[in-house]
Image (cartoon, rainbow, N blue to C red):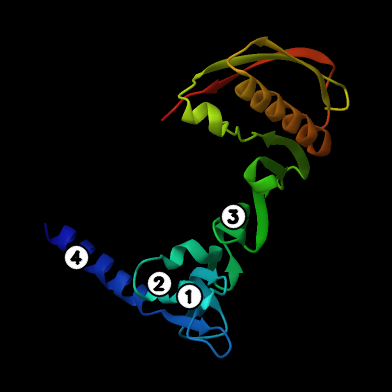
Amino acid sequence: MIKIFHTLLLILFSCAVFSQETKPITQKFHHSKQNAERYTVLKSNKQIKHGAYISYFRIPENEFKKIKKDILKLENYIKQKGSYQHGKKQGEWAEYIEPNVLSSKGHYAEDQKTGIWETYKEKGQVVERYDHDTNKKLRPLIKVYIVYPKRAREAGIQGTVLLKYRMNADCSIDNITVEKSVNPDCDKASIDTIKKLGAFSKKYDWECAQVELTQEITFKLD
């Protein structure tokens, strides 16, 4: 019992010492009250970042007023988020190209990128991947957004369109045909989706083979 008590005291003492090692820093934009960066530094050397790091986009004044009124959240304007360990980037980091639009994410180990990093293109519909452990570019992940036709939605039309198409060796797509129809608007939206898939595949993908494929696209009201 005494040993346990001593162990607990040692843990509490260690935590207290660690909590005193860093100092929080907030940097503002020039001539502004808006936060540009928030991070912590070592008390022993205030030039060395150690702990959580976050930076923000500069916010339009009308939106900044809404943040102060707690109508909007500052977290929606993050530009970069991660952590430092003794001045070096460590752990997961994420970067945004604009508010709420992810640009890239991955892990650092002592300031070096490690593992698989993802880069987001085409508003997140294409995810390029690179494995820094093997120095190899991986095939991208492609997921095209489906647009529910306004007239079909308003008319309460639901169903699944079945398409047949050909994927070519250069990753382009052609010979799109409707095997099962829902209505003209949904059919067209489905064909447009596959065409966009073909455009993204040809631009970002590789190692494709010529093959006949089928795809179901479902339109379902919430």
Dot placed on the residue nearer the N-terminal end, 2 or 4: 4
SS for dot 3: strand
> Total label count?
4
- Residue where numbered disc 3 is placed: 101
The spot of residue 158 in percent (x, y) is 49, 20
Q: Residue at x 47, y 24 (%)?
A: 220
The spot of residue 198 in percent (x, y) is 78, 29
Q: Nearer the viewer, mark 1 or mark 4?
A: 1
- Residue where numbered disc 2 is placed: 66
Task: Report, in whole angstroms, how far the alpha carbon at label 2 lies from the one at label 3.
Answer: 20 Å
Q: Is residue 117 visible?
A: no
Three-letter amino acid code of the residue under disc 3: Val
- Residue where numbered disc 4 is placed: 6
Q: Is residue 10 visible?
A: yes
SS for dot 4: helix
Q: Is residue 189 left or right of residue 176?
A: left
Dot placed on the residue nearer the N-terminal end, 2 or 3: 2
Three-letter amino acid code of the residue under disc 1: Asn
SS for dot 2: helix
Task: Report, in whole angstroms, how far the alpha carbon at label 4 lies from the one at label 3.
Answer: 50 Å
Task: Report, in whole angstroms, how far the alpha carbon at label 3 lies from the one at label 1.
Answer: 20 Å
The spot of residue 42 in percent (x, y) is 48, 80
Q: Residues within 10 Å of mark 3 (few under 14, many from 20)?
A: some
Three-letter amino acid code of the residue under disc 2: Lys
Q: Which mark is residue 62?
A: 1
The spot of residue 44 in percent (x, y) is 48, 86
SS for dot 1: helix
